[in-house]
């Protein structure tokens, strides 16, 4: 049936998915994601980054499916401590606290956790369907991109981040340009001349962006945690029994509009670069409140299940849709998808518009694994979220040194180069500076990631178009469209600023 | 919680005051320093090697200058009563506020001082890895950091540091064959 609708690569993907190793990778990856996502201070991004070096010896299919499963599990896992102890495991679950923890205080934690598991799993399935349907035509279209278009696509990706995030235009562009410049370190692709390598042999191959990600998203977060700590404000209240799971299923079924609205909002926001679960759950919660009648709207925040449905249907839906630009264009819109793109590159696949063409079976297997993973989130969540919740009580003083060691070891493991340890430290410090002075981390990471695409697109395109700016910029209707989008992003950000 | 606030420098000429938020200078300053090194390192390279990197370098420098102008510098109309002097530092350099809540024992370990010590310890750990070896460096780093964040039980300190270091060593060195 699927084979009639989708390319032949689907057959290969189904073959990959039927392997017991791959199925085990989904089972384990989802569980690992939920466990780490449930630890306060551990985001989905950190989970993917820290487990990427561990996957190096495995086949790309097993490794990438493990990581994509951990990604979904971690987004869901963040809601567990939000409901149980009023402490979101990640920014994408902040809104879950508002009604989820109120329900816990009323003795209905199991009910709230079960609703969270059901809507997270089902919303994930909806978003995965969107990914499966929309990714192939977008990737087909992306094959029409020539060299100038690839360069303009990279520029567009950097200009849309401040537009989506509402950051300062000059700060976002500076972070992006600095990232692109970091991406040029090493031998240039034309004549193999070393550029800014500080005399380090390892840097002749450039700065590995997984190492940059470890510094910016893991070590910086550890330094930041050391400054602010986490405060667990919840307490243990006696909870009602297992019949709550049945009530939870009824609560979701009787509120289909709330659930589908949240899932669609999450799917839409997740597909935008720069906006992820952290934005989606706020928007979804506000929309749910706006659509409610006055009497219900006033009760949001007091422990009503509509609040949990709005928050958790949207945050899990962002995963599938965030993978659309990541897998089709090679443009990650968030830290988590950037980390996944890093893993894709580390395992020898070529991220970018040619990914579906060159490695269609692996990419489709990743997409299809989301369907299994989201069903598992539902099962794991219903069966054991109150047990996963105990992880939230791990003292932060143990988390900080452990994650710091894993960041250092992971940084080295990427390519066994001692210089990478110093790069991790440097970007860890830079990450703190970015948080303090409100620079978008994603812009810097995106700059480093897109460096290769931007350089080859610019140099080859420039030479092929006769070194003419007009011929380069107006190479095709796609190039003109991208120029218009770049201009629009800049205008929108300037107006917002 | 302890806070750190980089100073804002105020300068006056006539009726105009110029305020510079030195914290906002940090990242653009770092970028400009890197660009300077990049320029010096690549100045002799053939044009083709710098076909993309050259214009990118100048664009980055321009963006750093614009960011300084937009984010760090503000010009006032001279109404500020403090603007009468020759200029000076408005707030004390790197002012450390005293802990505002001394009763919060758990929170008291999470301060800018702790974060700074953690950064120094991490840097020391990275430097020490090669000369003293992975296991010794990791155990020492873990024990020192746990102590920094309030663990005082010697059994917990020794047990966790050794156990975690050996666990990581087994996974990365023995299983994944990473030559740490």
Image (cartoon, coloured by chain):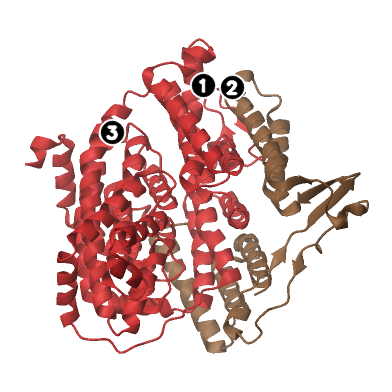
Chain colours: A red, B brown
Q: Disc number at residue B51?
A: 2
x 93%, y 51%: residue: B86
Q: Do marks 3 and 2 share a chain? A: no
Q: Circle 2: is it few (<14), some (14-19), or many (20+) Cα within 10 Å?
A: some
Q: Circle 1: is it few (<14), some (14-19), or many (20+) Cα within 10 Å?
A: many
Q: CA distance from mark 2 to mark 1?
A: 7 Å
Q: Is residue A325 above or below residue A428?
A: above
Residue sitting nearer the eye, A485 or B33: A485
Q: Earlier in the sequence, mark 1 or mark 3?
A: 3
Evaluate if marks 1 and 3 touch, with contact meaning CB atoms under 8 Å apart. no
Q: Do marks 1 and 3 share a chain? A: yes
Secondary structure beneath dot 2 equals loop
x 86%, y 49%: residue: B11
Q: Residue A12's x, y, as percent?
A: 16, 41
Find disc 1 in the rendering and name its residue: A459
Q: Give the quadrant of the N terminus of chain B.
A: bottom right
Residue sitting nearer the eye, A404 or A332: A332
Find disc 3 in the rendering and name its residue: A138
Evaluate if marks 2 and 1 touch, with contact meaning CB atoms under 8 Å apart. yes
The residue marked by circle 3 belongs to what chain? A
A254 vs A398, left or right, is left
Q: Residue A156's x, y, as percent?
A: 46, 33
Q: Is residue A363 above or below residue A29?
A: above
Q: Residue furthest front?
A: A294
Q: Residue furthest left?
A: A1
Residue A63 visible: no
Q: Quadrant of residue B82?
A: bottom right
The residue marked by circle 1 belongs to what chain? A
Secondary structure beneath dot 3 equals helix
Q: Disc number at residue A187?
A: none
Q: Circle 3: is it few (<14), some (14-19), or many (20+) Cα within 10 Å?
A: some
């Amino acid at each position: 049936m699927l084979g009639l609708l989708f390319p032949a690569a689907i057959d290969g993907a189904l073959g990959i998915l039927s392997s017991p190793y791959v199925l085990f990778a989904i089972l384990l990856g989802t569980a690992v994601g939920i466990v780490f996502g449930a630890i306060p201070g551990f985001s989905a991004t950190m989970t993917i980054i820290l487990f990427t070096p561990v996957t190096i010896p495995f086949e790309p299919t097993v490794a990438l499916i493990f990581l994509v499963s951990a990604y979904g599990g971690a987004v869901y896992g963040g809601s567990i401590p939000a409901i149980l102890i009023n402490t979101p495991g990640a920014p994408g679950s902040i809104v879950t606290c508002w009604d989820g923890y109120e329900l816990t205080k009323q003795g209905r934690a199991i009910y709230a956790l079960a609703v969270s598991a059901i809507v997270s799993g089902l919303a994930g399935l909806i978003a995965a369907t969107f990914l499966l349907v929309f990714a192939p035509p977008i990737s087909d279209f992306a094959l029409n991109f020539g060299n100038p278009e690839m360069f303009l696509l990279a520029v567009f990706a950097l200009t849309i981040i401040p537009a989506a995030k509402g950051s300062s235009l000059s700060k976002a562009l500076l972070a992006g340009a600095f990232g692109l410049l970091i991406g040029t370190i090493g031998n240039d692709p034309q004549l193999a001349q070393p550029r800014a390598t500080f005399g380090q042999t390892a840097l002749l191959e450039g700065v590995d962006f997984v190492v940059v990600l470890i510094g910016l998203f893991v070590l910086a977060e550890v330094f930041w945690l050391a400054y602010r700590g986490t405060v667990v404000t919840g307490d243990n209240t006696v909870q009602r029994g297992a019949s709550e799971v049945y009530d939870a299923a009824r609560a979701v079924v009787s509120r289909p509009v709330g659930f589908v609205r949240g899932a669609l909002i999450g799917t839409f926001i997740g597909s935008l670069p720069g906006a992820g679960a952290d934005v989606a759950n706020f928007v979804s919660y506000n929309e749910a409140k706006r659509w409610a009648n006055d009497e219900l709207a006033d009760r949001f925040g007091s422990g009503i299940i509509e609040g949990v449905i709005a928050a958790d249907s949207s945050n899990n839906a962002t995963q599938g849709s965030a993978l659309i630009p990541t897998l089709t264009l090679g443009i990650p819109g968030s830290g988590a998808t950037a980390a996944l793109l890093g893993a894709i590159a580390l395992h020898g696949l070529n991220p970018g518009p040619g990914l579906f063409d060159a490695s269609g079976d692996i990419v489709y297997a990743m997409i299809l694994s989301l369907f299994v993973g989201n069903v598992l989130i539902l099962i794991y969540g219903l069966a054991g979220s109150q047990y996963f919740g105990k992880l939230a009580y791990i003292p932060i003083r143990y988390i900080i040194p452990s994650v710091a060691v894993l960041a250092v070891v992971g940084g080295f493991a990427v390519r066994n180069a001692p210089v990478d340890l110093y790069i991790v430290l440097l970007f860890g410090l830079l990450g703190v500076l970015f948080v303090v002075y409100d620079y978008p981390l994603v812009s810097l990471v995106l700059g480093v990631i897109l460096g290769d695409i931007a350089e080859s697109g610019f140099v080859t395109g420039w030479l092929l178009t006769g070194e003419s700016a007009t011929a380069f910029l107006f190479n095709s209707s796609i190039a003109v469209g991208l120029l218009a989008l770049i201009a629009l992003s800049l205008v929108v950000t300037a107006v917002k600023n | 919680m302890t806070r750190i606030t980089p100073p804002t420098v105020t300068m006056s000429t006539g009726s105009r005051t110029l305020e510079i938020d030195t914290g906002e200078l940090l990242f653009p300053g770092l970028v400009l320093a890197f660009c300077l090194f990049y320029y010096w390192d690549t100045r002799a390279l053939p044009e083709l090697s710098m076909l993309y990197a050259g214009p990118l370098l100048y664009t980055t420098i321009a963006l750093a200058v614009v960011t300084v102008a937009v984010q760090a510098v503000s010009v006032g109309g001279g109404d500020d009563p403090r603007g009468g002097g020759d200029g000076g530092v408005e707030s004390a350099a790197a002012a450390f506020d005293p802990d505002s809540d001394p009763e919060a024992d758990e929170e008291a370990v999470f301060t800018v001082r702790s974060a700074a010590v953690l950064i120094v310890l991490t840097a020391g750990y990275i430097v020490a890895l090669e000369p003293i070896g992975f296991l010794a460096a990791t155990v020492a780093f873990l024990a020192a950091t746990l102590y920094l964040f309030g663990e005082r039980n010697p059994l917990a300190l020794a047990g966790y540091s050794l156990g975690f270091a050996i666990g990581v060593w087994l996974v990365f060195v023995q299983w994944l064959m990473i030559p740490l």
